[in-house]
Amino acid sequence: MSEYVIEVKDLTRDFVMGNGLFNRKKKTVHAVRGISFNVKKGEIFGLLGQNGAGKTTTIKMLITMLAPTSGTCKVLGYDTFGQEKHIRNRINFIFGGEYGLYRRLSARDNLKYFANLYKITPKVRDERVEQLLELVDLKDRADTRVETFSKGMTQRVQIARGLINNPEVLFMDEPTIGLDPVGSEMLRKTIVKINNQGTTVLLTTHNMYEADELCGRIAIIKEGEFLTLDTPANIKSRLTPRAAKPVTHEEITLEDAYIQLVKGGDMA
Amino acid sequence: MRSSNVILTSMSVQMKQTFSRNMFKFCMLIAPFFTTVILGEMYRHSTADNFVAYVVLGSGLWNLWNSIAFSSAGDINRERFTNTLSIIFSAPADFRLILLGKIFGNTILSMGSFFLSVAFAIALYRPPIYVNNWSLLIGALILTITAFIIMSIFIAYLLTLSRKTAVYMNCLEIPFALICGFVFPIENLPVGVQAISWIFPPTWAVRLLRYSVTDVPYGFWENFVPLIITMLAFALLAAWLYRIIFKQTKVLGTLDMA
């Protein structure tokens, strides 16, 4: 088996959109345009980019939710389109935002249901649900309907849901959206903890501090194409100092490098 | 975990979710009263047989259809908006079993609206009711529910492919009830439309149900055989459709609203 748990080669995804009631005009949107990257087992890989850059579309193809238009997209050695059944019980995903849960059910009922869909035995399920409720600090509100939760609490249920099957590869799409600083810190610690236990993580975020702290490598994507793929330290070291904000290399942040890259500035 | 557990757990979640919705409570508890009164007034001066067939059974069947089909189709839309559709579709459990569990859950709840409609009709109009054959009535009722479930699965699969679920749902509700003869005999429809009625299993199921409680000018086998054939045809069509939607939803990207 390959040393990589994620293998992406020349991956593209187009969406055909229709406009107008009569004389419907079709327009093709190229969401992802020929990206290639590999992720090693145990790595935390960051995918950064502006809204609409193609991050979520890439993740959706990796988690077997969307078919690629062309190219190769493999997770754990299997094609994500056509060999889904070999992948699905070994991965999981966490989307940011308040959706993705049954809001009229309690946190505990949600977790139990998703555990059942991951074919976890009732004994293991019940133990794991309690552990996860403890982890995301929702034990006291476990039997309350999700619709009464704050944004941050809902997001914490999402995190617990994503960990329900102890995934080998975890995909996280802006998981800290809506979380307060304490919640964000809890999530970062959780990511480090599960990564230390061997889980590979692919993370998209707008929080550059988070990406810098967690990710071994980062790809920056713009309009469906990679601008760069390197370690955070290397990306920062290539930043050319700006006249408006003269800085030493120690002071350069990933955010400085990111802004310069997506605005089309020169990198060394 | 066995397939039955996926069905049971999906059924339980569905029932909890559905019954907490005010719209469903209205469809299940209040709408049967209005349907029964409207049909009761329409058939007030008709024969006793017609009254039983098209008011007592008709209102029950109409509400049963509304609750099963509307909920099952509406759930696809709701789950698409809340992004749970893509999650359950991408889970290791078979989506067909999840959907079946959801439809079973809706069916159990919808039976409430069927019995409530029948109870309203009997309480309000006190029609003379006699049952020719109780075991046939129970058998016909089970077959009717099975026919509705098969249609619901078929519709839910179709709606997984498209984001315009609400439009299709509204287009289906009343025409289907009329075409399948829930509230008047399909013989009253133009011949061309009757040909469409014959395609759908609920048409034959409803006729069989009526056969068990009233004196109708047709026999058991001439409804039972077409019912089984059309049910099998739609079940096979649904199985074939699933193979298509399993791929096409991912190609078209219709599982969520993003």
Image (cartoon, coloured by chain):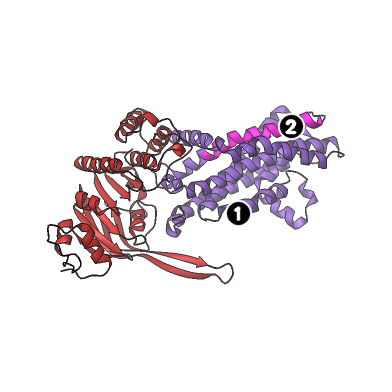
Chain colours: A red, B purple
The range drawn in magenta is: B102-129
- Vertical order, B156 against B52 (above or below): below
Mark number, residue A11: none
Residue A109 locus on image (x, y percent): 43, 33
Q: What residue is shown with label 1?
A: B168
Q: What residue is shown with label 2?
A: B120
Q: Is residue B54 left or right of residue B153?
A: right
Residue B34 locus on image (x, y percent): 73, 39
The quadrant in which the C terminus of chain A is found is: bottom left
Decide which of tag 2 and tag 1 comes sooner along the chain. 2
- Vertical order, A262 against B138 (above or below): below
Please state which amino acid type lies under the numbered disc 1.
Tyr
Residue at 23% over, 52% down: A209
Q: Is residue A116 left or right of residue B189?
A: left
Q: Quadrant of residue A143?
A: top left
Pick the front one: A106 or B239: A106
How many labels were placed on the picture?
2
Q: Secondary structure at mark 1?
A: helix
Asked if labels 2 and 1 share a chain, the reply is yes
Residue A83 locus on image (x, y percent): 35, 51
Q: Is residue B124 visible?
A: yes
Q: Quadrant of residue B203?
A: top right
Q: Is residue B237 left or right of residue A163?
A: right
Q: Quadrant of residue A114?
A: top left
Residue B5 locus on image (x, y percent): 44, 33
Q: Is residue B116 magenta?
A: yes
